[in-house]
Image: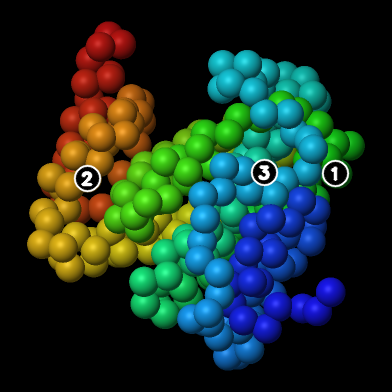
Amino acid sequence: MSEPTSLYPQLEAALLCRDVERKMALAVEALHGWRVDALPRSADAPPPYPLPEAGRPPLPELVHPSKVPKRSLSTRQGHAALLHAIAHIEFNAVNLALDAAWRFRAMPDAFVSDWLQVAAEEARHFSLLLRRLRELGHDYGDFPAHNGLWAMSCKTDYDPLARMALVPRVLEARGLDVTPGIQRRLAGIGDHASVAVLDIILREEVGHVRIGNAWFGRLCRQRGLEPETCFQELLRRHDVQLYRGAYNLAARERAGFSVRELEALRALCEDDTASAG
């Protein structure tokens, strides 16, 4: 079969690919091909379609979030399960970024550039975590996982505004909040190699959330919408609740959240602290 010579077939091939390492390579190749003008946007490409499931290997088994096993670091199994959970998030993040570039074709070239860059960086994150898993004697697919990230992709496939609001600004931004705590736990058992990997991931995820924030703001301005009001309406429409607990406000500020949003999140932290007292 001949290799794709335009952007959308390349992205579709990457999205549907079930081989983990080949998918990562295709994501990186898409960014390179786009940057050297080897993968132009083709007006006669078949249109995007609903994608209930992106390409993935037979494992991991996907279960309800409540059925995902606990990940205590007191055992080697729990240690590996924690890294597997993070790797699964990164795997889904690759598909989400590819899907944004493939699906929302009315968006400008800068949008494509941004999300192809995100896809390539997420692929690198996954590959780094896969290496750590294998060093611990495990592989991707060894533990059950849930499908929350991709499920949100399906719910927001009708509009890039909804996608930018609910994936980067909610789900991926939550990674900014929880990563420092995970790093402390890993450092506590002496896994400094994984801490270093998460340093890379946290730094680059700030940029990914910033990209989502920027496009959300731009789309709101184009449509004459007030961003914070629009965001709250999308949360209600999709029945999405903001998380309780600590927020990494410094990272969220670098990622482009407004002063008012940061104040609201700080109040959520305070409310949670008060309710726990």
Would residue 196 be seen by someone viewing this image from the given angle?
no
Residue 89: x %, y % from top left: 59, 42
| Relative vertical location of residue 214 with respect to residue 242 in this rendering, above or below | below
Q: Of helix, strand and loop, which one carries label 3? A: helix
Identify the residue at image location x=85%, y=36%. 138
Residue sitting at the far top:
277
The disc placed on residue 87 is 3
Label 2: which residue? 231
Residue sitting at the far right:
137
How many residues crowd mark 3 within 10 Å: few (<14), some (14–19), many (20+)? many
Identify the residue at image location x=55%, y=69%. 46
Q: Nearer the viewer, mark 2 or mark 3?
A: 2
Q: Quadrant of residue 201?
A: bottom right
In the rendered structure, which disc, 3 or 1, sits on the residue that comes first in sequence?
A: 3
Label 1: which residue? 134
Label 2 close to label 3 by CB (< 8 Å): no
Tell me the amino acid under the disc marked 1: Arg
Q: How many marks?
A: 3
Q: Nearer the viewer, mark 1 or mark 2?
A: 2
Residue sitting at the far bottom:
37
How many residues crowd mark 1 within 10 Å: few (<14), some (14–19), many (20+)? few
Residue 181: x %, y % from top left: 51, 34
Alpha carbon separation for disc pair 1 and 2 = 40 Å
Alpha carbon separation for disc pair 2 and 3 = 28 Å
Residue 261: x %, y % from top left: 19, 45
The quadrant of the picture occupied by the C terminus is top left
| Relative vertical location of residue 105 with respect to residue 187 in this rendering, above or below | below
Tell me the amino acid under the disc marked 3: Ala
In the rendered structure, which disc, 2 or 3, sits on the residue that comes first in sequence?
A: 3
In the rendered structure, which disc, 1 or 2, sits on the residue that comes first in sequence?
A: 1
Q: Nearer the viewer, mark 3 or mark 1?
A: 3
